[in-house]
Amino acid sequence: MRKKNILVLTGSARKGGNSDRLADAFIKGANSVGHQVVKYNTASKNMKPCIDCKACFRNDIPCLFDKDFNELSTYLDTSDVIVFATPLYAYSFPAALKLAIDKFNTYLVGEKEINIKESILLVTAGEDNKEVFAGIVSTYNSIVRIANWSNRGIITVNGLMDKKSILKTDALKEAEKLGQSIRR
């Protein structure tokens, strides 16, 4: 059996926060069964919005104007599984992660395929109501459908008001188990 290359895209600028810990628990599980995992923090990058120049993949460069997206694209090109690990912002993805997702359009315009076949969503929120996840889950499901990925799971954890609130839940064990469940 072959190990899988897994790309974990994070959306929070806060290291050690709830979504960061959730991502790390997933990574621990995936690593424990032999998968190769790259954690890519979109909040620490300086990606540029698409300007619709239609020069995607000209001279084999994904974007002529965005070196951070070009770096990300090297991981997109070699990954089998993508994981979105993020806090909930205004009922959706934070701007940095949403911008990275928007830049996936580069592949469509450049007529290139993303190798990813499977995806996972990990989301944390401060609010107590589980309904707050409806928007991000709907957006994620649309991305999965359009990209023709197989959804391997969604973990949503709400009521996390403090940086370490997730430690009082079973979510980290659930994420680690999900990481271990990725079939080779």
Image (cartoon, rainbow, N blue to C red):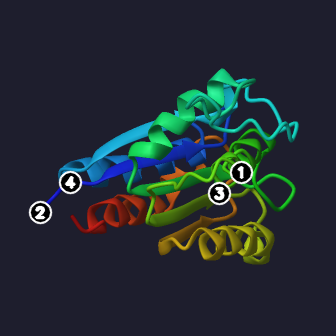
Task: Select label 3 or label 2 by which is in front.
Answer: 2
The residue tagged 1 is 109
State the CA–CA distance, disc 3 to disc 2.
33 Å
| Residue 126 in the image, given as x and y percentages of width and height | 74, 56
The residue tagged 4 is 3
Task: Select label 1 or label 4 by which is in front.
Answer: 1
Instruction: Give the vertical position of 40 relative to 112 (above or below).
Output: above
Q: Earlier in the sequence, mark 1 or mark 4?
A: 4
- Mark identifier at residue 1: 2
Residue found 70% across the figure and 74% down from its top: 142
Q: Earlier in the sequence, mark 4 or mark 3?
A: 4
- Disc 4, disc 2: CB below 8 Å? yes
Residue found 64% across the figure and 22% down from its top: 67
State the CA–CA distance, disc 4 to disc 3.
28 Å
* Snapshot quadrant of residue 58: top right
The three-letter code of the residue at mark 4 reads Lys
Give the secondary structure at mark 4: loop
State the CA–CA distance, disc 2 to disc 1.
34 Å
State the CA–CA distance, disc 1 to disc 3.
32 Å
Give the secondary structure at mark 3: strand
Give the secondary structure at mark 1: helix
Task: Select label 1 or label 3 by which is in front.
Answer: 1
The three-letter code of the residue at mark 1 reads Val
Q: Quadrant of the C terminus?
A: bottom left
The three-letter code of the residue at mark 3 reads Thr
Task: Select label 2 or label 1 by which is in front.
Answer: 1
Along the line of sight, the residue nearer the viewer: 100 or 74:
74
Q: Is residue 72 left or right of residue 182?
A: right
Q: Earlier in the sequence, mark 2 or mark 1?
A: 2
Label 2 environment density (alpha carbons within 10 Å; few <14, some 14–19, many ≥20) = few
Residue that sits furthest to the left in the current view: 1
Give the secondary structure at mark 2: loop
